[in-house]
Amino acid sequence: MTGRSLLLQSELLPEALDISFKIGPALLVIGMLGLFLTIGFVFRVADTDDMWVAGRSIGNVENGMAIGANWMSAASYLGMAASIALAGFYGLVFVVGWTTGYFILLIFLAAQLRRFGKYTAPDFVGDRFNSDTARAIAAVTTFLIGFVYAIGQAKGMALVGLYIFGNYGGLIPGLDGYQVMVVAMMVVTVGYLTLSGMLGATKNQAVQYVILILAFVVGLFVVGYTNGYSTVLPQLEYGALISQLGSEFSEPFAGSSYYLWVATTFSLIVGTCGLPHVLVRFYTVESERTARWSTVWGLFFICILYWSAPAFAAFGTDLYSQNVGATYGDPGMTSAASEVIVVLAAQLSGLPDWFVGIVAAGGIAAAIATVAGLFIAGSSAISHDIYTNIINEDATQRQQILVGRLSIVALGALTTLAALNPASSIAALVGYAFSLAGSVLFPMFFLGMWWENANRQGALAGMTTGLTLWSIPMINQIVPTYIGSLEAPLSTGLATWMPAIGSALITLPIVFVVTIVVSMATDEPSLETKRIVRQCHSPEPMSQQETAEDVVAADGGEDVATDGGRAVDDAAADGGPAVDDAAADGGPAVDDAAAESDRADDDSTEAER
C-alpha cells in the first residue's frame, strides 16, 4: 500500500470497530448475495419492457416494498443515524426532508406520471417538451445523479464489509483494505444488475426490504433491551436518554445555522420529487391507482425505519461515550465512527458476532437495493433515451439491452473510482444528488405536468440554468477535495449562502422563473401536447399498457379537459363556439345525438384510412 492509501484508510476506518474476518457474518452475507444473484437470474430480462419497467406488472404492496428498499439506501440505514449521532438536531433534516418529499410526490406526481406512461424520466422530458436536446440534458442529469448518489452507497458497503470480512489491504496492488472492499462490493452489485434488469431488481428489492428492515428494527430492540434503554418500544422510550447526551445532541442549531437547516431540508424535499430511480417506480405498475397506493405503502415502509433511526443514534452515541470516549468536544466522535454507528451500537452491546453480522448485512442490502435503482435509471438514460431515441432509432431490443448493460458497467466503474477516495460523508454525498435532482428535473416534472403552456424553449433554458447553478457550489466545495493543491471551500461566503447540500433553495426558484418567463415569451406548445397534459389529470381509468398519448390519439381529435368534468371540443379550445348552455352550466358538453355523430365521423375517417 502507498503512503496515501495508509493515510486514507486511517481517516476512514472507525475507531473501536472490530475489523477482522468473522465466519458467521461472512457466511450470512455471502448467502444473501447469492440469493440476490439467483433472483436476478430467475427474473432475468427478456425484452426492454422487462429491462426498464418490469413489464408494468408490479402490484402496489410489492412496488411499495421496492420503493422502500430503493429509497432506504446506506444514507438511510447508516447515514441518517450517523448524522443524528454526530450532528444531533441537524441530522433530523434527512427525516423531515425525505418524508415530506414523498407526500408531495404522492399528491402531485405519482398518478400523473403513470398516466403519461413512458419508460424513463428523460422520456417524459423529451416527449412532453418535444425536444431531443431536453431529453439528452435530462439523460445526462440522470446519469450524473446515479453517479453522485452511488458513491455514498459504495462507501457504506465497503465500511460494513470491512467489519464482516476484515482488512485485505494489498490484495489489489496499491489499494488499502477499504478500497479493496469498495471494488469487491461493486463487482458483485454490477454483476447481478447486468443480468437482472428492472424486473429482477424489483423482485430483489422486495426481498432486500424485508432483510434490511428486520435487521434494523430487531437490532434496535435487542440493543435497547440489552443495555436497559428500553423494554417494549425503543422508538418512544429513548427520550429518557436524550437529556444525558448533552446539548449537542438535542439543542436545535447548536452545531449548524438555521439557514443551513432550512436549505438542506428544502433541497431534500424537492430532490425527492425529482430522483429518476424513484420516479421510474411509477412506470412499473399497471395503473395510476396502483401508483398512488404504491407511494402510500412505500411511505409506510420507509417510516418504519425513519421512526427507529433517532433511537438507534441515541443508543449508539451513549454506548460510544461509555466504551470509547467522549462523543462531542475535542477530539470527540469522528465522522468515520458515526458512519457505522448502527453496527457499532450492536458490537459495543456485547452481542454475538452473528447477530451484529445480521445488522451489518442489512446495511449492505440497503445499499445494493439503492444502487440497483440508480444504475437501472442511469443505464436506461443512456440506452433508451440517448442511444435509441437520438442516435439509433432503429435499434433492436437486443442492441438496447446490450447498451444498457454496458452503461451499468461504465457507471459502476466510475462510481468505484470516485468511492476509493470519497469527498464527504454518506449522507452528504446523497444530499448533493438531491440538490441536482431538485434543481434540474423536479421543475420540469412539476411545470410539465401542471402547466400546459410550459414549452420546449422554457424547458431548455430552465434545465441549463439549473445544471449550471448546481455546478457552482460543487466546484466550490467538492472538486477541491480531489485536487491536492486546492483547499475547500474556495469561497467561504458562497459555501455559507449556497451550500452544495442545500443549493436547491437558491437554484429552484430561479429555474422556475426562467422556465416560466421563456415559455411565455415564446410560442405555446401544440394543442396535442396540451391535450396529453390534460389527459394526465383525467379521472377516466386506463388499461395496463395504455398511456395518455394513446388515449388522445384514439379520441380522434376530441379534447377532454378536466376543469370541473366538462368536455370541451376542439372548437372551444381554439376559441370557436365553445359549448351549449348545458355545458356552460356544468352539464354535458354535447347531447347523445351529437356524440353518436362524432363517433360515426371517426369510424368513417378510420375506414377511409
Image (cartoon, helix red, strand yellow):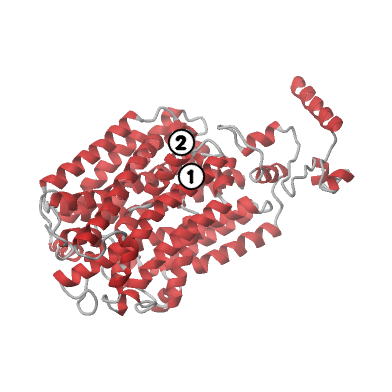
CA neighbours of label 1 inside 10 A, class few (<14), some (14 to 19), many (20+) = many
Residue 224: x and y, percent?
A: 24, 61
Q: Rounded to the nearest whole Å, what is the CA distance between mark 1 and mark 2? A: 10 Å
**Identity of the residue drawn at 59% across and 42% down:** 116
Q: Which residue is mark 1?
A: 294
Q: Which SS class for mark 1?
A: helix
Residue 193: x and y, percent?
A: 33, 39
In the rendered structure, the answer to whether residue 303 lies left or right of residue 568 reads left
Comparing 119 with 367, the one in front is 367
Residue 609: x and y, percent?
A: 74, 22
**Identity of the residue drawn at 16% across and 54% down:** 163
**Identity of the residue drawn at 32% across and 50% down:** 213
Q: Identify the mark at residue 58; answer none if there is no mark.
A: 2
Q: Which SS class for mark 2?
A: loop
**Identity of the residue drawn at 26% across and 52% down:** 218
- What's the residue type where badge 1 is placed? Ser
Residue 521 vertical position relative to residue 579 in the rendered view, above or below: below
